[in-house]
């Protein structure tokens, strides 16, 4: 038994399940519910931020990707181009690229916009008059950006999960 491969697969698969599951939950259940709750939805998002989901999720995603790169290196015998051109190689490469793009969108668009929207919403609650309306308009634009980017991340993770799940059987 190759213990290193076992540990890498546990990190990769366990992290991937958490990452994809959290994103699917956010896209299909949490975000629509928070949006439907109106101003009370902000309390839910504050609770999520206090529990560090926006810190934990990118760390888990990064560990998933790093363990995936290590696994890919081992099964491809050092990024052998002949292996990478095979059906399984092409499938795993597609999944790897999809997950890396999902990670980048998740961190630099989705997470950043969520944090900025929260900061601006808190600032708007403390201010009075016209600036509050302008701040809330910016918050709404950021929330739309979060919703759109989260859907892209979810779609890319569907591709990653599907290609990695079936790659060895192609």
Image (cartoon, rainbow, N blue to C red):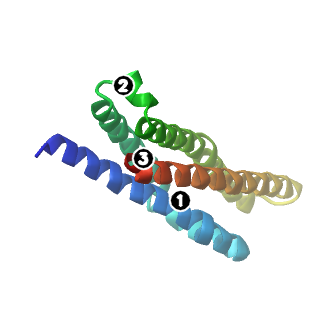
* 134 versus 44 height, above or below: above
Q: Residue at x 74, y 58 (%)?
A: 124
Q: Is residue 120 visible?
A: no
Q: Residue at x 20, y 48 (%)?
A: 6
Q: Is residue 149 visible?
A: yes
Position of residue 46 measured from the top left corner of the image (x, y, whole percent): 56, 64
Q: Which residue lies under the disc numbered 1?
A: 23
Q: Residue at x 70, y 70 (%)?
A: 35
Q: Identify the element where label 2 is drawn.
A: loop
Residue 142 horizontal side relative to residue 22, left or right = right
Spatial CA span between label 2 and label 1: 30 Å
Q: Identify the element where label 3 is drawn.
A: helix
Q: Quadrant of residue 85?
A: top left
Q: Nearer the viewer, residue 62 or 160?
A: 160
Q: Nearer the viewer, residue 22 or 6?
A: 6
Position of residue 43 measured from the top left corner of the image (x, y, whole percent): 60, 70
Q: Nearer the viewer, residue 111 or 76?
A: 76
Disc number lying in front (3 or 2): 3
Q: Which residue lies under the disc numbered 3?
A: 167
* 59 versus 93 height, above or below: below
Q: Residues within 10 Å of mark 2 (few under 14, many from 20)?
A: some
Disc number lying in front (2 or 1): 2
Residue 50 horizontal side relative to residue 138, left or right = left
- The residue sitting at the right extreme is 130
- Give the mark nearer the N terminus: 3 vs 2: 2
Q: Residue at x 47, y 36 (%)?
A: 90
Q: Which residue lies under the disc numbered 2?
A: 79
Spatial CA span between label 3 and label 2: 16 Å
């Amino acid at each position: 038994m190759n213990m290193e491969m076992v540990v890498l697969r546990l990190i990769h698969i366990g992290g991937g399940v958490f990452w994809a599951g959290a994103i699917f939950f956010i896209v299909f259940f949490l975000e629509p519910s928070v949006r439907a709750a109106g101003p009370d939805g902000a309390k839910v998002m504050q609770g999520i931020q206090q529990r560090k989901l926006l810190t934990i999720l990118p760390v888990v995603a990064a560990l998933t990707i790093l363990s995936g790169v290590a696994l890919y290196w081992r099964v491809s015998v050092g990024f052998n181009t002949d292996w990478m051109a095979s059906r399984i190689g092409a499938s795993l490469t597609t999944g790897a690229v999809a997950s890396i793009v999902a990670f980048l969108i998740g961190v630099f668009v989705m997470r950043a916009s969520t944090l900025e929207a929260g900061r601006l919403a808190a600032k708007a609650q403390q201010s009075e008059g016209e600036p509050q309306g302008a701040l809330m308009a910016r918050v709404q634009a950021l929330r739309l950006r979060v919703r759109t980017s989260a859907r892209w991340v979810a779609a890319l993770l569907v591709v990653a999960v599907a290609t990695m799940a079936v790659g060895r059987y192609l």
